[in-house]
Image (cartoon, rainbow, N blue to C red):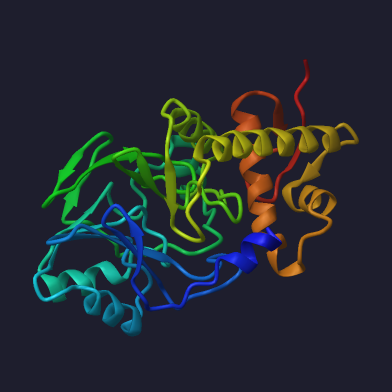
Amino acid sequence: MLSELSQFDPKTGVAEDLGDNIRRIVAPNPSPMTYRGTNTYILGTGALAVIDPGPDDDAHLTAILRAVGPDQWISHILVTHAHVDHAPLAAALSWQSGAPIFAYGGATDGRSTVMQSLSDRGLAGGGEGIDMSFQPDIMLPDQAEIVGDGWQLTALHTPGHIGNHLCFKYQNKLFTGDLVMGWASSLVSPPDGDLTDFMRSCTELQKTQWQEFHPGHGAPVAAPNARLAWLIAHRKSREAEILQKLQNGPRTASDLAAQIYTQTLPALLPAATRNVLAHLIDLTQRHRVHPLGELSQDAAFELAAD
């Protein structure tokens, strides 16, 4: 990670050519959750697609519009998911360009049944925050084709980081949003994130031999299938740690996070706790653990009887 930190340090607001008619503009919103900032991608040579306009930021809107040449125009605005670091600028960009907004659906579309139940009982999201007002002009189901001027994308519904998450296939490359990144593993924060869905989405992506991933934050992932294998193995390793700790008796998600994430900065422990909660919900669904009382973020969990 330290090597990645030193190597990926782009200038914000500048359209960088990545080849294959792809350009990237990094938004000025760096943080522990967004790394250097949100990657906005511009695809095409004439009529352009903008993928993940990013946060509601006037300087970033200006940078995107400045990247449109005199013989170019924005024809499509595509949003991988409705987190506040990816979606809010879509509305202003659509108003400026006249281009429609494409996405899987609104802020809470695609949620699994268990996550909707937790939300209905008051569990609120953690992490980046959701643009609750987000609603696309055109909803894209899984495998939907989006055809532009000299380019074609396929929308892949890849819930896990959030229920309405899409990746966009372009040739043998993939715009992965926040599902797969090279600098960190994806946050899975219930009720927006669902680890069962996350593992299924990563496993499904493994069925294709990819050339390169373009993530929502950080540098391109040059060995995509290896990264997918690592993410799946990392989650299975974390699951094993949780099960091992529960051998000593019932624990809450916050207890487990404090015991497992011993090298994590205090400011990031709430996110770590959310990741642990995601594992505990997944393990509950698979009958490996069960909560003492109602399933909730504050519940203590114990190993299920064999």
How many dots with numbers? Answer: 0
Horizontally, residue 300 falls left or right of residue 75, namely right
Looking at the image, residue 111 lies above or below residue 90: above
- Look at 76% across and 66% down and name the residue there: 265
Image position, residue 298 (x, y; %): 69, 51
Nearest the eye: 116 or 36: 36
Horizontally, residue 279 falls left or right of residue 194, namely right
Question: Is there any visible trace of residue 267 in the rendered image?
Answer: yes
Question: Is there any visible trace of residue 295 in the rendered image?
Answer: no
- Look at 47% across and 54% down and name the residue there: 220
Looking at the image, residue 56 lies above or below residue 17: below
Image position, residue 288 (x, y; %): 70, 25
Nearest the eye: 164 or 182: 182
Image position, residue 56 (x, y; %): 35, 76
Horizontally, residue 18 falls left or right of residue 136, namely right
- Look at 77% across and 38% down and name the residue there: 242
Looking at this rendering, what residue extends furthest in the right direction?
A: 248
Nearest the eye: 302 or 183: 183
Horizontally, residue 89 falls left or right of residue 225, namely left
Looking at this rendering, what residue extends furthest in the top direction?
A: 306
- Look at 22% across and 56% down and name the residue there: 136
Image position, residue 12 (x, y; %): 43, 78
Looking at the image, residue 230 lies above or below residue 127: above
Give the quarter of the figure containing the N terminus.
Answer: bottom right
Give the quarter of the figure containing the C terminus.
Answer: top right
Nearest the eye: 39 or 123: 39
